[in-house]
Image (cartoon, grey):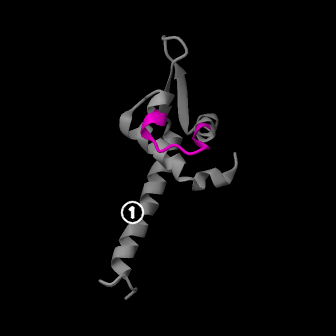
Amino acid sequence: MDPDILHSNTVYRILGYVSDNGPCNKSDIYDNVRISSKTVMILDVLIDEGFLTETRLFRHNTKAIGITDLGMRLLEAHRGIERAMADHAVGTEGGDGSEQ
């Protein structure tokens, strides 16, 4: 896996959507996550690398996409970094946006 893929916001939008909505199919993800030209590739990488699971359902050519423990850990770490950055920005900026 290309480590740069983890810098893509699409990764965290996909993981967040699946985490918040439970197992879903790919079309649900494509309909509800802002799609970039690399979304299909990123989704496949997340499945191949074990961040998401893909389970065939009984319906013809339908698969459920779920999040794994590894995917949850990555998403929680990302959300923790976002919270820390937001908290830091609030604590270090003056009312005019300048640093104190």
Q: Quadrant of residue 88?
A: bottom left
**Direction left: furthest residue:** 95
- Picture residue at 53% right of the left edge, 48% below the top: 10
In the rendered structure, which amino acid carries the disc numbered 1? Arg
Q: Is residue 36 magenta?
A: yes
Tell me the quarter of the image containing the C terminus.
bottom left
Left or right: 53, with 93 as reference point = right
- Picture residue at 44% right of the left edge, 51% below the top: 76
Q: Say which residue label 1 marks.
A: 83
Q: Quadrant of residue 97?
A: bottom left
Left or right: 98, with 10 as reference point = left
Give the magenta part as a residue range. Answer: 29-40
Q: Is residue 2 magenta?
A: no
Q: How many neighbours does mark 1 have within 10 angstroms: few (below 14), some (14-19), or many (20 or more)?
A: few
Instruction: Report helix, strand or loop for mark 1.
Output: helix
Q: Quadrant of residue 46?
A: top right
For residue 94, above or below residue 30: below
Total labels: the figure holds 1
Q: Position of residue 37 (x, y in %)?
A: 60, 44
**Direction right: furthest residue:** 2
For residue 49, above or below residue 6: above
Q: Position of residue 15 (x, y in %)?
A: 48, 43
